[in-house]
Amino acid sequence: MDNILVWTMISILVMVGLVSVVGIISIYLERKVSAFMQDRLGPMEVGFGSLANAIIGKKTFKEGRIGLAQSLADGLKLLQKEDIVPKGADVFLFKLAPMIVFGGTFAAFAALPLAEYFVPADINIGLFYILAISSFGVTGILMAGWASNNKWGLLGALRSTAQMVSYEIPIGVSLISIVMICGTLSLKEMVLAQSGWFWNWHLFGAISHNGAIGIVLLPVMFINFLIYFTCSLAETNRAPFDIPEAESELVAGYHTEYTGMRFAIFFLAEYGAIFVGNAIAVTLFLGGWNSGIPMLDEANIPGIAPLIFITKVFVLIFVVMWVRWTLPRLRVDQLMNLCWKYLIPFTLFTFFYVTIYKVFLT
Amino acid sequence: MSYFGNISKAFSTIATGMKITFRHFKNARKPDGIFTTQYPHKAVPLPKFSRQQLHNRIEDCIGCMKCANACPVSCIYIETVKAPAGTLSDTSNGQKRRLYLTRYDIDMAKCMFCALCTYPCPTECITINSDFNFIKFERKDLLYKFSDYSPEQVEQIKQEAKLREQQEAAEKIAKAKAAAEAKLKAETEAKAKAEVPQVEAKTEEVKAEQKPETKE
């Protein structure tokens, strides 16, 4: 009992740190990945040594060469910036909006199963909770766009809301297939069901649940995964679905009027949301904290389970960035077209396929 | 296009694009995979004859004003004070320096980088180099002062020159007096003798020697 309490305390603290650390690491990765894909170098000057030198005002430490502390330095810079509230803004909502956006993302972190004894809030409706709480951020985005009293902000917020609401449907339906197979909404139990060899992962069907016959679900699970991944891009406003932020059309979308730390909070929340979205993909489809090789899991190396989980998530985040720096932005009508005409029919198809499998083959 | 044709086309085009970006990502480790030059640490050398910043080797400058006269925008300001012979060292190509350069300023804000000032320079002391990094925060900082005398020294030089001038003027008066006396003497001698035109010519020569030299 005591042991579990201690672990819970530690995992809560880790989650608090994780949100900001994940944001900082993802921003650095984003800049580096985008740079390499465009034959640039990305941040190179601000290493931890140079940052420390700048703070103490002396050249004591060795200067960095690959810019590891760039995001940290940016954060420090944003902290010092003036906090501007536009004249015509609704001050209360304007100040509340970043908190709601960040709160939604941060609350979703609580239910992520990093390891078997490393779930800050091990609730039996974990998946439902995450889906609900991460959609909560839409309210904050709409609030930010409305309260800014700015046409770009409002347009971005409207687009964002339309997009997020329509993409909730394929996400929900594609995840229901997994819920049907597992018979639970608890993320921890879903991951436990995928332990053992990597073919037990839900991406490859339902082998761990029903033995070899589960392989018939392989194609639909692949489709489900692709659809979930695509929709999570749209949910988190990432390219090619970044029309709410659309730099070339809407300045910056709903956070056009935000400065300093409030802007930084939006930024952190965005990367936090990407992490949550991909963490769900890893949990549901890619075996969560399981390495896919039973011998490695049974070796009981301390701390390896969360490491495996985070590594998998960051591999997916890399794919998200890769997609972002490859594909051009969709138009609003193309976006809706993709969602309603292509993604929803396919999710419905996989949903029925899994239902028939569940009823007749098990 | 058919419904499934759309889907397959979407997949194939996305795959093509993703392959291209991944190739660039992979090549980023190779030395020629990245096109960035990290400027302050590494710079692409400029062409050999690129004209960027004017420089004057002040120890070689004789203050001849040729550069200032050649400048189409008049951005070179020179002030000189005559120096007594032998006080200044020779230039590196053996020319005599006879002038203190109390002021040699180049206004790079006015300069149009034609380098016409460098051609007439007899000692080749004014040059235009490839150093392009001379950004300044104040416009007045673009006025480059090449003179190696401090304002106090300039003041001193000017006063000394003034003293010397007065001295010279006094000497000149004395000389003129002497000359006048000589002339008088000659005249009296001439009177004494018959009128000889040769002596007249000699005094003319003396006068020409004593003519005051132009300043600056």
Image (tube, coloured by chain):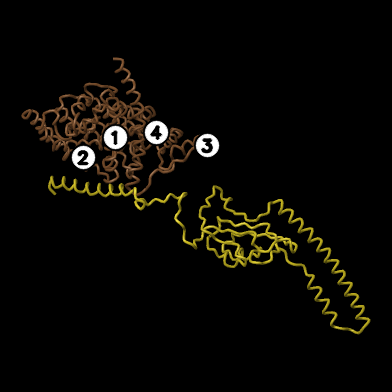
Chain colours: A brown, B yellow
Q: Amino acid at mark 3?
A: Gly
Instruction: Tell me residue A16's x, y (percent).
Output: 35, 26
Label 1, secondary structure: give it: helix
Q: Which residue is mark 2?
A: A336
Task: Find the distance from the CA under tag 3 to the CA under tag 1.
Answer: 36 Å
Residue that carries the numbered disc 1 in the rendered image: A311
Kindly state the secondary structure of the residue where label 4 is placed: loop
Rendered location of residue A211, percent (x, y): 11, 30
* Earlier sequence position, callout 3 versus callout 1: 3
Same subunit, labels 3 and 1: the answer reads yes
| Amino acid at pointer 1 | Thr
- Image coords of residue B34 (percent x, y): 36, 50
Labels 4 and 1: the sequence-earlier one: 4
Whole-angstrom CA distance, mark 2 to mark 4, is 32 Å
Per the image, the residue denoted by label 3 is: A57
Q: Assess disc 1: are there few (<14), some (14-19) or many (≥20) residues with their C-alpha within 10 Å of its C-alpha.
A: some
**Mark 4 or mark 3, which has the lower sequence index?**
3
The residue that disc 4 covers is A88
Where the C terminus of chain B falls, by quadrant? bottom right
Q: Earlier in the sequence, mark 2 or mark 4?
A: 4
Residue nearest the viewer, comparing B4 with B30:
B30
Q: Chain of mark 3?
A: A
Question: Within 10 Å of the Cα at label 3, are there few (<14), some (14-19), or many (20+) other Cα atoms?
Answer: few
Mark 2 crowd level (few <14, some 14–19, many ≥20, 10 Å Cα): some
Under mark 2, the amino acid is Met
Q: Are marks 3 and 2 on the same chain?
A: yes
Position of A135 compared to B182: left or right?
A: left
